[in-house]
Image: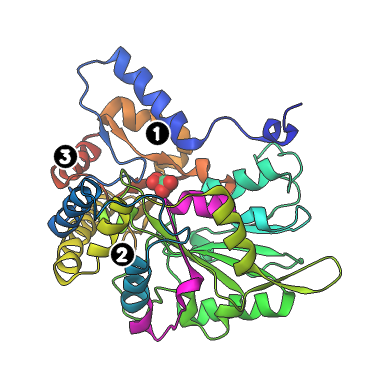
Amino acid sequence: MINENFLKLQAGYLFPEISRRIRSFQAQNPDAKIISLGIGDVTQPLAPAVLEAMKKAVDDMGSETGFHGYGPERGYDFLIEAIIENDFKPRSVDLDKSEIFISDGAKCDTANIQEVFGVDNVIAVTDPVYPVYVDTNVMAGRTGQANENGQYDKIVYMPCTAENDFTPELPSSPVDIIYLCFPNNPTGAVVTKEILSKWVDFAHGNKAIILFDAAYEAFITDRQIPHSIYEVEGAKEVAIEFRSFSKTAGFTGLRCAFTVVPKQVRAYAKDGGAVEVNSLWSRRHSTKFNGASYISQAGAAAVYSPDGKKQTRRIIDIYMANAALIRESLTKLGYGVFGGVNAPYIWMKTPKGLSSWDFFDILLQKANVVGTPGVGFGRAGEGYFRLTAFGKPADVKEAMERFAAI
Ligand code: MLT
């Protein structure tokens, strides 16, 4: 017998569906030079400091003394210590090494974390949302069927549109697990510490847990915006945070990320007893995962070296210059444009009330430019379209020229 929950899933996963449409268009138009600003995949080469560290790690692996077999399940201390010192201490967040879990990606971590929670938990997600949060809960049986809008029964959706500045309202019905992603994928919105505090208070008041996806924190430019939910008082008792080297340091093809599960986070057993989530996640992690490779972890640690910091910052600046160019160009052309200031995603209104997929097709056919239809992230994304700033600068420039010509 199969897991029937899989039959509830809508169509294919968003990005493979986009790739399918591109392949079909390219097959019919072999000469078209397609520019992809669709999936948020990085294009700049790795920082030299990262490369050097990985070359050294490869040499280690080829030597009697430096060879590494299975690493510690939670990751190597050299990386965990660098994370604590550089990502959290400067923001006055004290973490213990046992609270950090190195992995091979935030997609997997945000997908897998739900396994430690019961299937009766009610989850709340923003709409639009990174589809992984929803689909993995569908697979686990935490939802009912989808309605005609693609929304699943038993999930609480929190619409984020231009009207509410892409900031979700607190749920009006009880929820157990809340997924928040800031800087947001797909809208590029960010939230202040004051807004995050309301969520933390809500979680305290409702015995809920916040799953905070901070994969894009390195793109924040506004000094007032928090990079970690733990900058908010009381968050350590109610929040789990996900980070990634994918976008920050170009690791999409290398794989390295981490999850922070503070020891204070508690969830409740049927008998009402409080259980430490850290030990559940540790059990899950060590049972199902054998660690990110030594070479990736050595590369990730080099992101925190003085040269690594400067070099990765330069790469992020390139992407944020792309974001600024996209914002300016589209604004000049009269489009409604959001995001792209503290995030590598630009969220735009489709013109003339076109549906997201209709605009996708027009853009592909007329400009040979690929973006991501907003509705692919949820019903409230209909009428919006996402562009990523992760393209090569020359491609982004050309894409904007082509936009002007449609
Ligand atoms: C996106 O385009 O939304 C991201 O690249 C997807 C991901 O990080 O998995």
Q: Residue at x 76, y 26 (%)?
A: 1
Q: Is residue 386 left or right of residue 306?
A: right
Q: Residue 147: where, in percent of width, then height?
A: 72, 39
Q: Is residue 26 left or right of residue 353?
A: left
Q: Residue 177: where, in percent of width, then height?
A: 66, 63
Q: Is residue 341 left or right of residue 321?
A: right
Residue at the extreme front:
64
Residue under numbered circle 3: 398
Q: Is residue 318 above or below residue 377?
A: below
Residue under numbered circle 1: 360
Q: Residue at x 62, y 67 (%)?
A: 279
Q: Amino acid at mark 1?
A: Phe
Q: Measure the alpha-carbon separation of dots 3 and 1.
A: 17 Å
Q: Which residues are magenta?
A: 88-112
Q: Is residue 180 left or right of residue 310?
A: right
Q: Amino acid at mark 2?
A: Phe
Residue at the extreme top:
28
Q: Is residue 85 above or below residue 56?
A: below
The image quadrant that residue 338 belongs to is bottom left
The C terminus is located in which quarter? top left
Q: Measure the alpha-carbon separation of dots 2 and 1.
A: 26 Å
Indicate the secondary structure of the residue bearing disc 2: helix
Relative to the observer, which residue lies in front, 235 or 391?
235
* Marked residue nearer the N-terminal end (3 or 2): 2
Indicate the secondary structure of the residue bearing disc 1: helix
Applied colour scheme: rainbow
Relative to the observer, which residue lies in front, 165 or 155?
155
Relative to the observer, which residue lies in front, 282 or 228?
282
Q: Amino acid at mark 3?
A: Glu
How many residues crowd mark 3 within 10 Å: few (<14), some (14–19), many (20+)? some
Q: Is residue 129 above or below residue 207?
A: above
